[in-house]
Amino acid sequence: MKKDLKKLFKTYYSSKTKPEVVTLDGAHYISINGKGDPSKIEFSDNIQALYSVAYVAKFIAKELNADFVVPKLEAQWWYDEKKYPDLSIETAPKKVSRDEWEYRLLIRMPAEVTPGMIADAKVAAVDKKGIENAASVAHMSAEPLTAVQMLHVGPFDTEPESLLLLKAYMAEHGYERAGLHHEIYLSDFRKTAPEKLKTILREPVRKLG
């Protein structure tokens, strides 16, 4: 049986269409960092590199009787808050140039996939598949956290509407931001109509005071 993280960690991969608080366990990922407009080729190339390593890691795990379903793509997003001060979570997407956004693309890995297996997968992706920037893929661990999140249905450019709801919820319940904005892409945005896209918007938080 293939391990399916989406089924094993339902809280992590699901959300309501209204703001809610969730508590998440620690996890580990493969990741790749970048900067710039996600409509440009560099972003697509980074996605390709990440998936190439994910699928080689899957093959290695399968050989060890630890096969798994490659999970959904995720990303953390941030910008230079010194250059763009006093912006809120719902205004930043409109005020900060797309070329100025930094990101970390992520794919969660099961516990059976070790850093050594990821290192081997990177080498194979470069040497056998010819995907040079797979060398930039890294292993990343995340600690348990509390987050406010909601499911956004629709195009990415309407996300500020949902982010405004998250901001209001955080203010009402006494939370402040405590980490990078996080998105989980439940839909394949290369193949899905914009109005049908489903994206979990997640803000790590802590209680004020």
Image (spheres, helix red, strand yellow):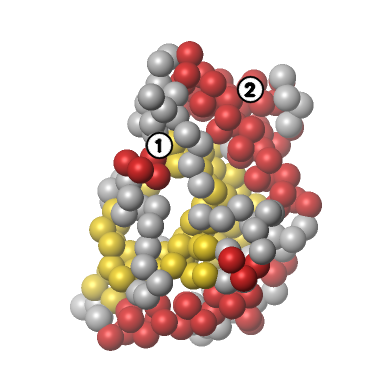
The amino acid type found where label 2 is placed reads Val
Q: Which of pointers 2 and 1 lies earlier in the amino acid sequence?
A: 1
Question: 161 and 205: which one is in front?
Answer: 161
Label 1 residue SS: loop
Q: x%, y% of residue 110?
A: 39, 33
Residue 31 in the figure: left or right of residue 131: left
Q: x%, y% of residue 136?
A: 63, 37
Residue under numbered circle 1 = 4
Res 85 seen here: no
Quadrant holding the C terminus: bottom left
Q: Residue at x 68, y 40 (%)?
A: 48
Label 2 residue SS: helix
Question: Label 2, label 1: how many angstroms apart (C-alpha)?
Answer: 25 Å
The amino acid type found where label 1 is placed reads Asp
For label 2, the crowd category at 10 Å Cα-Cα, with few meaning under 14, some 14 to 19 and many 20 or more, is some
Q: x%, y% of residue 132?
A: 74, 32
Residue under numbered circle 2 = 123
Circle 2 or circle 1, nearest the eye? 1
